[in-house]
Image: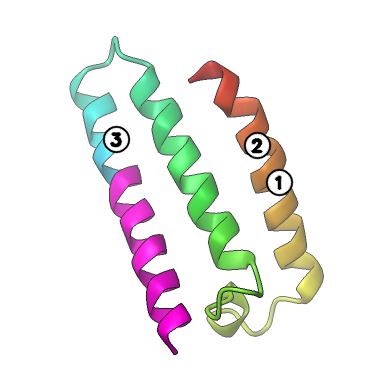
Amino acid sequence: MIETGIAIFFAGSLMAMTVYHVILFLLYRRRQEYIYLALLCAGIMLRSLTLNSNGIPLQSVFPLLGFEAFKTIEYFCVYGLMAVFPLY
């Protein structure tokens, strides 16, 4: 129960950080690091929602998608984060 609350708080915080950095990028177009940090936050948030160990897997929200779809999202997040991190 407490792990679910912590996971929801963590995902919500990352979502807020993503929105904040996208807004900063829209305000200051010359500063590219804001969009890269927003992509990193969004990737970490998606990965944390697709893990089965945190108590709130995305599978409970989208029950029609199979386990393979969530593992594909997780793998794309991991490798996408590895590609975006050097750009930041």
The amino acid type, in three-letter code, at marker 3 is His
Neighbor class of circle 2 (other Cα within 10 Å; few <14, some 14-19, many 20+) is some
Neighbor class of circle 3 (other Cα within 10 Å; few <14, some 14-19, many 20+) is some
The part of the chain drawn in magenta is: 1-18
Up the image or down, 40 lies above or below 74; here it is above
The alpha-carbon separation of the residues under discs 1 and 2 comes to 6 Å
Q: Is residue 5 magenta?
A: yes
Q: Residue at x 64, y 46 (%)?
A: 77
Q: Is residue 32 shown left or right of residue 48?
A: left
Closer to us: 2 or 65: 2
Q: Quadrant of the N terminus?
A: bottom left
> Are discs 1 and 2 less than 8 Å apart at CB?
yes
Task: Tell me the SS state at disc 1.
Answer: helix
The amino acid type, in three-letter code, at marker 2 is Gly
Q: Which residue is mark 3?
A: 21
Q: Which residue is mark 2?
A: 80
Tag 1 or tag 3, which sits nearer the N-term?
A: 3
The amino acid type, in three-letter code, at marker 1 is Phe
Up the image or down, 69 lies above or below 77; here it is below
Closer to us: 88 or 61: 88
In percent of width and height, residue 66 lies at 76, 76
